[in-house]
Amino acid sequence: MGGTCGITSSKTVLVFLNLIFWAAAGILCYVGAYVFITYDDYDHFFEDIYTLIPAVIIIAVGTLLFIIGLIGCCATIRESRCGLATFVFILLLVFVTEVVVVVLGYIYRAKVESEVDKSIANVYNEYNGTYPDAASRAIDYVQRQLHCCGIHNYSDWVKTRWYVEAKNNSVPLSCCRASISNCTGSMNRPSDLYSEGCEALVVKKLQEIMMYVIWAALAFAAIQLLGMLCACIVLCRRSRDPAYELLITGGTYA
């Protein structure tokens, strides 16, 4: 009686987990897409395209999880030994892949600061204040979104080519505080400008994005471990005792 209860509970949990896998597939694809979209906004400050590898893997894993959920549900309801074995094997592969994502995430997260530090001065020096220019758009976007100005503070603009050519002792309007309506970007009124530099905030933002990938991979890896455990229980019970109660019909397996 206890064995039947245990196996039925395992199968019920397994079906429920497969439904979670479908939800997880959508969440992982969303996280991966979010990383791609955000990277596009900050790509001028971070030139290493390999940083996107964890996001690519996360999207691939999300797509595979949808297929895994379908295989798992069919195999559990039909109690197919081959199907369950395939389900466990694929889950194991995905689990290993997510461990790789976590490792890569930590590696690239550690590289963010040095990469930004290496490129940000060049990006600011390329600024020319025209909207079609990619570097100008990137800087204006970051300064408005992160409420920052310059690399370390607004005085860094003095060293840029744009400031030298403009000769008006001002910074771009994207440095103006949102609450100041008549801000002209003049450095004679520093209280109108964002006081914090952008480098530290860009590094923080990119590291946060990478942490989303890491935490998503860790959370769903834990769920997959539970799924593998339940599938193994069903497989082991089926191997030892081929006559037990079916999940749907309530009959016995012949």
Image: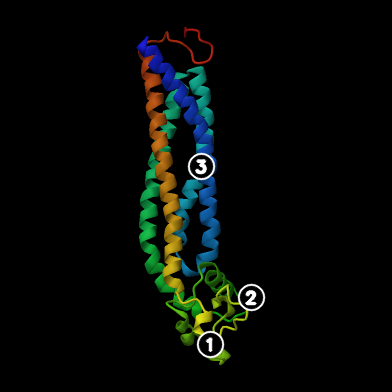
Residue 163's disc number: 1
* Sequence-first disc among 1 and 2: 2
Q: Earlier in the sequence, mark 1 or mark 3?
A: 3
Which label is found at residue 131? 2
Res. 151 in view: yes
CB atoms of marks 1 and 3 within 8 Å: no
Q: Position of residue 229 (x, y in %)?
A: 37, 27
Mark 1 is surrounded, within 10 Å at the Cα level, by few (under 14), some (14 to 19) or many (20 or more) other residues, namely some
**Mark 3 and mark 2: span between their CA atoms?**
37 Å
Judging by the rendered image, the residue that carries numbered circle 3 is: 62
Where residue 25 is drawn, which disc sits there? none
Q: Amino acid at mark 2?
A: Tyr
Q: Is residue 126 visible?
A: no
Q: CA distance from mark 1 to mark 3?
A: 47 Å
Q: Which badge, 3 or 2, is on the more N-terminal residue?
A: 3
Label 1 is placed on what type of residue?
Tyr
Q: Amino acid at mark 3?
A: Gly
Asked if residue 250 is positioned above or below residue 218 in the image, the reply reads above
Q: Position of residue 164 (x, y in %)?
A: 52, 90
